[in-house]
Image (spheres, helix red, strand yellow):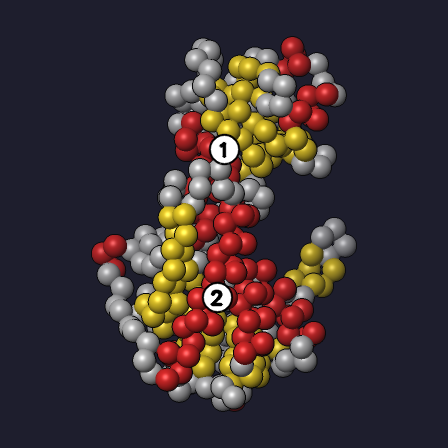
Amino acid sequence: MTKVVFMGTPDFSVPILKGLIENYDVIGVVTQPDKEVGRKQELTFSPIKKIAVENNIKVLQPIKIRKEFQEVIDLNPDIIVTCAYGQIIPKEILDCPKYGCINVHASLLPKYRGGAPIHRAIINGETKTGITIMYMDVGMDTGDIISTEEIDITPEMTVGELHDKLSIMGRELLLKTMPSILNGTNSRTKQNDEEATFGYVIKREDELLDFNDSTKNVHNKIRGLSPFPSSYSMLDGKIVKFYRATIGNSNKDGVPGEIINIYKDGIGVKTNDGEIVLKEIKPEGKKSMEVSAFLNGINKDELLGKRFEKE
């Protein structure tokens, strides 16, 4: 049976690893080092390490794989499959397996190379994205394309919903593509670098919502960061996180960020060109909640005219 080494870290990679375990001989898993999580800073396995341990698969966790690559090579895999591993893989590993090093990437390359392709596709208002199976090279998601599959991004879809759909799609496309890679009948298409765009990792400053932007862009950002890591703004000096919103149709005057309408199940906030209606939020120190529940406990009239502002 084909010997596979899998390299990955987050939840997105889990269905892909499980699919490989069910169909191939996974002889090793490479994942990021354990992290201290939560208030108690408890050392926590990555989702991929948990699956590997459950299946008695050897786990390697190099701090810097560019320097600590020999253990991977010593496993002598026939093929290496990567998905959201989190480090740049050195040429020494890429050149090791006879069938190459294959990556499952959550975009239609060359669009959205990088670490946050799912978030960026929604934030930028894309209506389509997909999965690309590709050969890896020394660049960042620049290798030759083997196969792709496309999916529609619906107008209300969040990054969490799209993440889960693409994760399953990645597993299915990989399992469909693997036989052709192993028997040498797969296609191989070079990427057009001139068409490349980038899905850069989300930083804290990216999470701040700017109501001076258009309603459409505000809506895309809320759903493109929901539920993780979530967008936010400040109200009365406290952080409010946003998880779900709809585009409103109020023409009331106001300044961007101002609360201009209180609905039964939403808060209407002025944007640069209209209104965004907040439907699900998380006030500082509380759990996320439907806005209808939030409104039950406050004086609605006092909310009108208040303004969401930057830090």
Instruction: Say which element carries label 1.
Output: loop
Q: The disc labelled 1 sits on which kind of residue? A: Leu
Relative to 71, say whether 18 is above or below: above
Residue plotted at (52% across, 72% down): 7
* Residue 30 image offset from top left, x and y in percent: 56, 75
Placement of 240 over or under 46, stated as above or below? above
Q: Please indicate, yes or no, whether residue 72 appears anywhere in the rendered image.
A: no
Say whether residue 293 is left or right of residue 12: right
How far across and down, in percent of the image, does residue 59 sit? 62, 78
Nearer-the-camera pick, 170 or 40: 170
Q: Is residue 140 left or right of residue 168?
A: left
SS class, disc 2: helix
Res 130 seen here: yes
80, above or below 114, in the image: below
The reply, left or right, for residue 174 in relation to residue 192 is right
For marks 2 and 1, give the CA distance.
35 Å
Q: In the rendered image, which quarter is residue 285 located in?
A: top right
Of mark 2 and mark 1, the one earlier in the sequence is 2
Q: How many labels does the image show?
A: 2
> Dot 2 corresponds to which residue?
172
Q: How crowded is mark 2: few (under 14 residues within 10 Å), some or many (20 or more)?
A: some
Residue 285 or residue 166, whichever sits in front: 166
Residue type, numbered disc 2: Glu
Eye-nearest disc, 2 or 1: 2
Q: Which residue is drawn at 36% across and 73% down?
A: 135
Binning the other alpha carbons within 10 Å of mark 1 as few (below 14), some (14 to 19) or many (20 upward) gives: many
Residue at position x 39%, y 67% from top?
Answer: 133
Residue at 31%, 58% in the rendered image: 110
- The residue under label 1 is 209
Q: Which residue lies furthest to the right in this view?
A: 40
Percent position (x, y) of residue 87?
A: 48, 67
Question: Where does the image place residue 295, in percent across and percent down from the top left?
Answer: 68, 21
